[in-house]
Image (cartoon, helix red, strand yellow):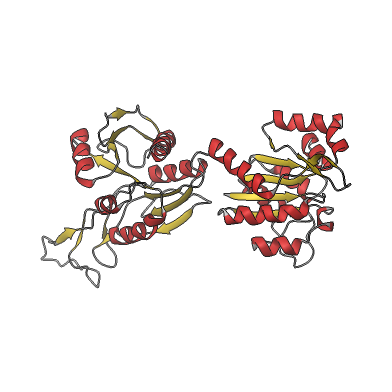
Amino acid sequence: MRIAVYLTGGIACYKAVNVVRLLEKKGHEVRVVMTKNAEKFVTSATLASLTKYPVLEDLWLKENEAQISHVSLARWTELALVVPATANFIAKMANGIADDAASTTILATQAPKYVVPAMNDQMLANPATQRNLAFLKENDVKILDPVIGVLAEGYKAKGRMPEPEAITSWIEQNLRETLPLTGKKIIVTAGGTREPIDPVRFIGNRSSGKMGIAIARAAKRAGADVCLIYGSISVALPKGIRLIHAETTEKMLSAVQEEFPKADALIMAAAVADWRLKKVADQKIKKSMDQANLDLSLVKTPDILKTVSKNKRKDQLVIGFAAETNDLLKNAQRKLKEKGADYIIANNVSTDSFGSDEDKIFILGQGKPVFELPRMKKTKVADKIVNLLQKSLFIR
């Protein structure tokens, strides 16, 4: 997950460095924003060294200075964490004040916001601070309350920032509740494969890649670490998802086999070619005037779904697709049995399914009744499939 960490000017800033370190250790991509007062406690060089990204400190860049703009960072962010959060910065957030890089960026951020207040106990108890915290909570900002401990003034009271381990555990717990696939690695295949005839021509299909890409996006929204392996597509590729292009069936199999040992699930939404040429011509095949026919010798391509299903671990899930033009459920049941996948998503492509924004599917599972879904947008179908994925992964 892409996390923007905001450091504001409290003495607890030194502990925020360890929060950044722990988030990175858990596999998150972290970038840092600092207020001017935060820089009095820790240096931006320390945070830049940890994250390998420039720290955003100022709205006005110096000449030749390498910084991401506040607008770009706001769009990049999938979770915003303010740690430590001073009373001043909390007041800015609650009242929409944007007078520096940090307050401007977080105001422009649409991502979920997590705030860890740390301050003197009297400042924390002040009615204005309590009103601001209450307002943020009412507007779905997550707040981790300060703990009782020795404050900067030397006495023990409520206002101390929790330890970094407690902060990262709190974030992970919230992510599990709101983003159910957090921590899960999902592979999705999309589009059609192409098998070359000669340097110009190929055997292909009409797959647009819409369904697979919709599934990849839905899995990403659910918090998963998604790898999209795609062939020929006619739609835009998603941003923020790791992409691998595989033109032929053999290349797609190789990519899947490379990624699958590290994954929790595979969704094979790609329309994979069943046949390839026995011998691909080195040069473009010419048409002669007296030639009435062209005979091509074809051989089977490797069966990706069957190969992966046969070698999967018990804790891994494999979902395949059956795109049929007749005897939909009969052929899908046969495919489920022969391939060894956990589920088959069956759809009839004799209508206008290829390239359409809508689809009607049946879900078939090992030892489970057939579940029929009404015709709906492919984005909605993708949400249903990801919901199935989520439930199946957590009961294994």
Which residue is at the front of the view, 33 or 317?
317
In the displayed structure, does residue 375 sit left or right of residue 171? Answer: left
Pinpoint residue 56: horizontal percent, then vertical percent: 74, 56
Marks counted in the figure total: 0
Of 332 and 143, which appears nearest the observer?
143
Rendered residue at 33%/61% (across/down) = 254
What is the residue that sits farthest to the bottom in this orientation?
282
Quadrant in which the C terminus appears: top left
> Height in image: 288 above or below 68?
below
Q: Is residue 132 left or right of residue 177?
A: right
x, y percent for residue 229: 39, 54
Whole-percent x, y for residue 220 in the image: 50, 45
Looking at the image, is 118 positioned above or below residue 65?
above
The image position of residue 288, as x and y in percent, is 15, 67
Residue 29, image quadrant? bottom right
Classify residue 175 as left or right of residue 219: right
Classify residue 80 by image quadrant: top right
253 is higher (above) or lower (below) than 331: below
Which quadrant holds residue 161? top right
Establish if 325 lies above or below 199: above
Please tell me which residue lies in front, 164 or 207. 164
Whether residue 12 sits left or right of residue 371 in the image: it is right
Which residue: 63% across, 44% down? Answer: 79
Does residue 325 appear in this view? Answer: no
For the question of whether residue 223 can be seen, the reply is yes
For image coordinates 10% across by 60% down, the residue present is: 292
